[in-house]
Image: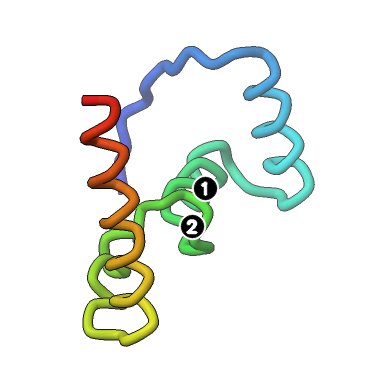
Amino acid sequence: MYTMAKTLMVSNSVYEELKKIKENENKSFSDVITELITKKDGKTGRDLWKHFGVLKGDKEYDEIKKELKKGWNKWQKRYA
């Protein structure tokens, strides 16, 4: 597979971290970067959308939301 080379500018600290990973795992920079941007460990927030609405219909969630709404309305009247 033919790939075209590109130049990226990163800080020295980022370069050093990438270089450490590259050398420890005996991989190319492209492989290291690809793994980092496609990692599915939940720390990037990339998959956060699939969790929106999960609590909808949950009784405990609905009660908490109701109480928070009362407080929010009270706060809005006071400061808005």
Nearer-the-camera pick, 57 or 65: 65
Instruction: Give coordinates of residue 39: x percent, y percent.
Output: 48, 57
Within 10 Å of disc 1 (Cα), the crowding (few <14, some 14-19, many 20+) is few
Left or right position of 67 against 20: left
Instruction: Give coordinates of residue 25: x percent, y percent.
Output: 72, 52
Q: Residue at x 53, y 63 (%)?
A: 41
Instruction: Give coordinates of residue 66: x percent, y percent.
Output: 28, 67
Left or right position of 34 against 78: right
Numbered badge on residue 39 = 2
Asked if disc 1 and disc 2 are in contact, CB closer than 8 Å, the reply is: yes
Check disc 1 and report its element: helix, strand or loop.
helix
Residue 10 occupies which quadrant of the picture? Answer: top right
What's the distance in space between the residues labelled 1 and 2, CA to CA? 5 Å
**Considering the image in quadrants, where does the C terminus appear?**
top left
Colour mapping:
rainbow
Q: Residue at x 65, y 33 (%)?
A: 18
Left or right position of 54 against 8: left
Task: Tell me if residue 61 comes above or below residue 70 in the rendering.
Answer: below
Left or right position of 23 against 4: right
Task: Tell me if residue 75 comes above or below residue 12 in the rendering.
Answer: below
Instruction: Give coordinates of residue 53: x percent, y percent.
Output: 23, 71
Residue at label 1?
36
Q: Amino acid at mark 2?
A: Lys
Q: Amino acid at mark 1?
A: Leu
Numbered badge on residue 66 = none
Check disc 2 and report its element: helix, strand or loop.
loop
